Image (cartoon, rainbow, N blue to C red):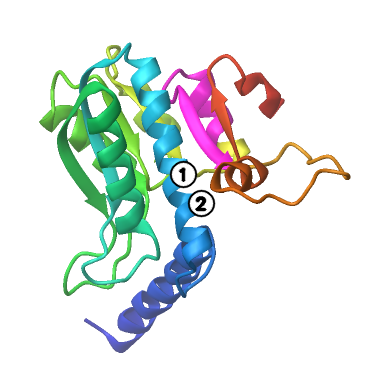
Amino acid sequence: MSIAMKRRRVIVLVCMLVIITGEFGCSQKSPVKEETYCTAARVLAEETTKLLSDKGQIVVVTYDTTTVPVPYAAAQLDAFTKSIKLKSHVSIAAVESVGLNKGDLALAATLDGEKYGEIISQHAGIDAIVSLAGPPVLTDAEMKKLPSNLPKCLVFGGSPSKLKRLFRADIVQVAVISRFTPIAANAPEPRTNEERFNREYEVLTSATAGSLGD
């Protein structure tokens, strides 16, 4: 591999690390921030239970932290897993991860079209994909090739603009995202984990995704 190619890969790695740490709030752990992420995971578990009418099999997608530490990823996965097992008859068929491949600087810290397609083909018959690593990133061509009987998809994170086309195509049915609806100017400061969650995040469903606008 040429020196120029190695340098480009390093630049890609650094840029994606900035994106990951930004998505998770900071590069150093904060107990309050971690609990907010865990609350988001529990909310996503509740939404999964509702969407599947309390039964079915799911695949959970998280970040691969074996090479690059991702703050709160492990805690969030643990919170989701415990919540879904405790409160429902939904079972986790598999946990998949996205991120760095060992020994490689080619970072794909998103649920890209290739990985999304692999999950669907390798776990035939699952009822839903729950991604803690953001929504599927699909090209128009990849969307056209998707089977008609897709599993439901619930995600944590993602921009309104990217989620809009996924909701419209009925690829994503639920998303927990950073709040984009304004908070009232006189709203009190949050004191509980639930209040912090409601201040920082909101839940979008197929029924409420119209708030994303055109």
Find numbered disc 2 in the image and state the secondary structure of the residue it sits on: helix
Which residue is drawn at the image coordinates 28% and 43% (left, top)? 61
Depth order, front residue of 214/159:
159
Which residue is drawn at the image coordinates 56% and 41% (left, top)? 194
Above or below, comparing residue 55 to residue 165 in the picture: above
Depth order, front residue of 29/193:
193
Q: Please identify the residue farthest to the right as the structure is shown.
A: 186
For marks 1 and 2, give the CA distance: 5 Å
Work out whether residue 47 can be spotted: yes
- In percent of width and height, residue 133 lies at 38, 48
Residue where numbered disc 1 is placed? 39
Find numbered disc 1 in the image and state the secondary structure of the residue it sits on: helix
Crowdedness of circle 1 by 10 Å Cα count: few (<14), some, many (20+)? many
Depth order, front residue of 142/4:
142
- In percent of width and height, residue 9 lies at 34, 75
Residue where numbered disc 2 is placed? 36
Q: Quadrant of the C terminus?
A: top right
Q: Is residue 60 left or right of residue 207?
A: left
